[in-house]
Amino acid sequence: MSQTGISKLDLKRRNRTEILKLLVYHGPLSRIDIARNLKLTRAAVTIITNEMITQGIVSEIGEEIQADGKRQRGRKKILLDICGNYRLSFGVVIDIERTHVGLADLKGITLEKETLYANGLSLKERINAACEVIRKWVSRNSLSQEQILGIGLCISDNACSVLGYQYKEECYRIAREFAVQQLNFSIMVDGTAESLAVAELVFSQSGARKPENIVLLRYGYDVDAAVMVDGKVYKGHTGKAGRFAHMVVDTQGELCFCGKVGCCITKMSVQRIVEKIKKMYSKDRTPYLYQISGGDPQRLQFTVDNLKIFVMDEAVQKLYQEALSYLTTALDNILNLLDPERIILFGFVFEKILDLDMLTKLMEQKHNWDLKDKLCLSCISDSRIHLAGCGICVSDLFLEKGGM
Ligand SMILES: [Zn+2]
């Protein structure tokens, strides 16, 4: 006889998953509102949530206050929320030149974080270094195996290329193998932009429903994007969707490391811009830079915080304008093709260099888009990029498993 239908345990897990997802995607809710949202009976919700309260997964956080500040009349509505510290997870992000490692709780509160400079190191050396940091934190915080959901390991497409892997799947597989040899935790591996989109959905704070049709755009140490449709990352037929960095924006442009010509990344990447600034450095073309560095290009320090001051020179300003114009063209294409509910902007360029109001204005003037409620900064700052890895752990190892 063939097995059809689902077991009682599957059903229980499914209901728990639905409730946990609702609390995470929507924010604290009362039992009656959970029942209404999920079309479950109040009795069923009470049984399921009481069990999760006993287990320390969910807790009552107080009475619901109405929009006008008054308490509810009649029967009190007690809000339920996820207990952030019920489980912790490690996030590791392998970027082109850096490895970011962090430890966070279910709400994305970071407990530990460290950035390792990894220029020129192999994938194995980078995984080993990250695992060493994790072992140090496990012992320092006396963490037990059962407190930890797992490790979310994120590798950007461009980092895969720089590390010498033509196919990212192979890079992911090898990274997982190295990590499994080192640590006895569940290990998830995925792309960085894809994981950031998941983390955005899991960790952003919202009093209302969070948008589930989004495009996440990364612009910082790397240029990348991910597309999320109905709360799930869209990967395309062969896993290559969202390769924003290699969208061709100039058919007469420079050769990209991917072998094509005029990719977005060759126009926009901060590394490329810094390389170009160094090349044009001279008393005539970059008088301001020449002056502050005393005529010695070695003394120019390019950091996240001082990139903005380099725009004092007209020639450099031009480079920025060019990058900005390619960015807006790319944004225009994304909007036309995907019509997302929101475009989430991640990375230090959006945080510290580019003014969002200016970007919105440019999109209106040049491309005729009204993006007032569409463009927004990610809830995750560039300095907490490890949350990408923590996000996929919370999503796959906690929510999808119903916290079981
Ligand atoms: Zn390319």
Image (spheres, rainbow, N blue to C red):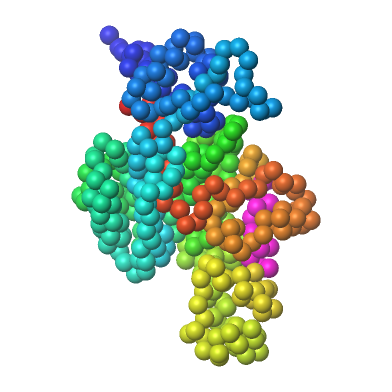
Residue 62 in view: yes
The residue under the point 66% across, 28% down is: 69
In this picture, is 328 found above or below 373? below
Residue 201: image location, x then y, percent: 51, 39
- For the residue pair 115 and 246, the one nearer the viewer reads as 115
Nearest the eye: 222 or 24: 24
Range of residues picked out in magenta: 321-336
User: Is any part of residue 162 visible from this angle?
Assistant: no
Is 295 in front, or is 205?
A: 205
Residue 67, horizontal then vertical, whole percent: 67, 28
**Tag count in the figure?**
0
The residue at 46%/9% (across/down) is 43
Q: Report the quarter where the C terminus lies.
A: top left
User: Is 317 included in the stretch rendered in magenta?
Assistant: no
Question: Quick check: 390 above or below 282?
Answer: above
Q: Quadrant of residue 359?
A: bottom right
* Residue 88 against residue 125 in the figure, above or below: above
What is the x, y in percent for residue 22? 50, 27
Majority secondary structure of magenta residues: helix
Q: What residue sits 65% from the left and 48% below the top?
A: 375
Q: Does residue 332 show up magenta in the picture? A: yes
**x%, y% of residue 337?**
64, 44
Q: Is residue 331 left or right of residue 216?
A: right
Task: Identify the residue at horizontal 37%, vertical 37% (top origin).
Answer: 85
In the image, taking residue 24 as reference, residue 172 lies left or right, namely left
Q: To which quarter of the image does residue 158 belong? A: bottom left
Image: 1 above or below 84: above
Q: Quadrant of the N terminus?
A: top left
